[in-house]
Amino acid sequence: MLQTGTGLLADRLKSQSRLWFGEHLYRYFERLEDNFHRRSLTAINPVEQAELLAQQSAVKRGQDEAFRQFADHINQAFTTKRAYDTGSYPALDRLAQRLEKLPNDYFMNEKPQLRNFCRAIAPITVLAGFQQILVPLQLAPAHRHQALTMFQGLLIQELSNLYDALLESLPAENQTHNVEAWISHIKQQLSEKNLSTQERALTETRLQRLLKLHSHRRSANDNPNAIEPSDSDLLDAAGALFQQLTTRRRLTPGILGSLNTMQTSVSTLALQDRSAFMHPLHPARQICRQIINTLNQWDDAQAAQRQQFDLELKAISRKFTGHNISASQFNSVRAEVDACCQHLLQSIKLNDKRSLNADVGQKRLTRLRKKVHDMLDEKTDGAELSVSVDNMLYGPMTTIILYHWLRHGSNSAPLRRSLQLVDDILWYIKPHSDWSELRRAKAMSKDIETELSDGLQRINYGYRAAQILIEELHQLRLNASGRSVSISKPDAKR
């Protein structure tokens, strides 16, 4: 069954809302994780610290399932026949009132669906969705109040922005009766870069329906005999498809060659199909738009992805080198073009996500390094350190501590041993006057140098550089021993 105008509008509003909820919900999960992690770093009680870290891990593991259950809750609300009552939320009231003003002659009898839509995205419905994420995130009762406060701040209080965005996406009031406005909007949707095969096919079907509706609504005095476009008009229309490319100067010679081949074929086809070619849903025009929209993101792709797209586009363009070019040839490569373009776009999207994760990881590493330096400042407060020791502690020794912190956790035995090694080194290189301390320093020599060597090896510190560092440490111990004043035996020196 064909969808009406309201079905089209309702689908678009629901899709826009789902995207907004997805972005803000995952941002909420990230902030919640970060909250538990930061609190664990400042926790004094080891039990409390372990509990906070466990809660952070639970949020990380359960966020995808929590998102699924929240999405199910919203989708269920979309299908529930419960209209929105105005008077509680001004921004949502404005949206509901605008939807009410949509003309009945175009949207027929499906306005209740839009009233139900406003109820589904109301703050009371979204807040009820918080209950859906408690179990997947395994939020302990002690943390639920704070989690709810964050949910209200990051989602509920931001809903007015969603309502405003939905309001702006509606056609202007004086254009709601104009099918041409919807045709323009659907054409804009077709130019979007990340439409899947199914979404693109559905959007094209909607455009065909609107074009048919538009033709039925033409006034009786319209001239039924359309004027056939001239050769110049056809060639201009074909060339305009490729003029939308904004990255031409940065494309490879292979890509440019494929585009030139396609443009020649499309121009030839335009002169053959004439009136049919001027239709925006002509297969050649659709395929060219999709390729051009994809290439406009060329700068964001990596070298291997560009090379693969270059080869695939070259193979596609070779199919249009025959003399008897036809629209059916473009129809036959539709799936191939869609797969080729979607692969590049999805790869770019994945690269963006990896880059974002790398930035987040780098910021976290910077914060942890500063925290380690603060701990070292406390341990070395008042001590007179040589340049070599200072460089060792705030250089490779800091990296060793970070290695164990990131790999084993902030309350792990390996991390505690690394911090104890710092204390041992600082004590080891100090002059001592007591006989037992001198004997202890001598006995610690091998263990300290072995443990330091193991740590440097874990962080891939160069072998020669590690030996120089250990030799410097050994020399510092000898110098300290020479400055020591023994109260009994001279063999306190090494």
Image: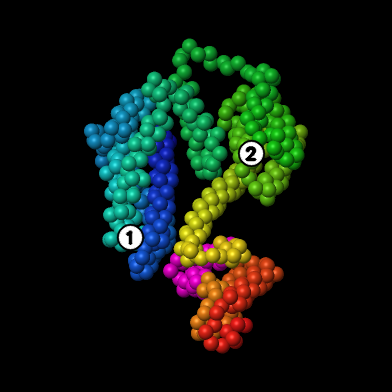
* Residue 462 x/y as whole percent: 67, 67
- Residue pointed to by mark 2: 295
Q: Residue 95 in the image: x percent, y percent? A: 33, 31
Q: Is residue 409 magenta?
A: yes
Q: Would residue 114 be visible to someone looking at this image?
A: yes
Q: Is residue 220 left or right of residue 278?
A: left
| Residue name at image x 62 percent, y 23 percent | 275
Specify few, some or many for label 1: CA neighbours under 10 Å numbering under 14, 14-19, or 20 or more.
some
Taking depth in this image into account, of 290 and 63 the one nearest to the observer is 63
Q: Secondary structure at mark 1?
A: loop
Region in magenta = 395-424
Q: Name the main secondary structure of what is drawn in magenta.
A: helix
Quadrant for the N terminus in the image: top left
Place of residue 109 in the rendered image (x, y in percent of width and height, measured from the top left): 32, 31
Q: Which residue is mark 1?
A: 139
Is disc 2 surrounded by few (<14), some (14 to 19) or many (20+) residues within 10 Å?
A: many
Residue type beneath disc 1? Leu
Q: Is residue 404 magenta?
A: yes
- Circle 2: residue type: Leu
